[in-house]
Image: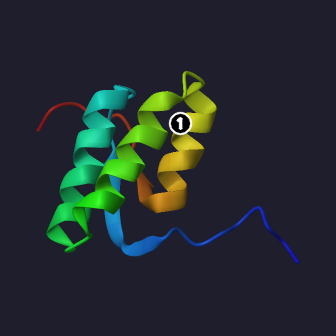
Amino acid sequence: MDTSVMEPLYPEIRVALRSRNRYALVSAIRLGLRKAGTPPAEIERFSREALSTQDPCHFEKLCSQWVCMDRTSSRGAE
């Protein structure tokens, strides 16, 4: 069984990864979770887990475990 490709807890929520700013990303994911009707306790659990790690790779992996992350290319402001 291939465990490297796991579906996130909330696959219906898609968040664009446009910045490396961890607080902006956590905020965008929290908003998506709220809009999807996720219980506040779950949203708080995500926030605690995401903000407790200092490793950028682990942070991005953790976010991907919760929602679908869309990696956008860096294009100029439109």
Q: Is residue 55 above or below residue 17?
A: above
Q: If the image is split into quadrants, where does the C terminus sit?
A: top left
Q: Is residue 37 above or below residue 55?
A: below
Q: Position of residue 74 (x, y in %)?
A: 35, 34
Left or right of 44 in this view: 57: right
The quarter of the displayed image where residue 7 is located: bottom right
Mark yes or no: residue 72 visible: no
Residue at (42%, 31%) from the top-left corner?
51
Residue at (62%, 33%) from the top-left corner?
57
Q: Residue at the top extreme?
A: 54
Residue at (26%, 70%) from the top-left corner?
38
Q: How is the image coloured?
A: rainbow
Q: Position of residue 50 (x, y in %)?
A: 45, 39
Left or right of 74 in this view: 57: right
Mark yes or no: residue 54 visible: yes
Q: Residue at the left extreme?
A: 78
Q: Amino acid at mark 1?
A: Phe
The quarter of the displayed image where residue 35 is located: bottom left
Secondary structure found at label 1: helix
Q: Residue at the front extreme?
A: 41
Q: Position of residue 11 (x, y in %)?
A: 43, 74
Q: Position of residue 64 (x, y in %)?
A: 51, 54
Image mark count: 1
The quarter of the displayed image where residue 58 is located: top right
The residue under label 1 is 59
Foreground residue among 70 and 7:
7
Foreground residue among 69 and 26:
26
Label 1 crowd (10 A; few <14 / some 14-19 / many >=20): some
Residue at (29%, 29%) from the top-left corner?
23
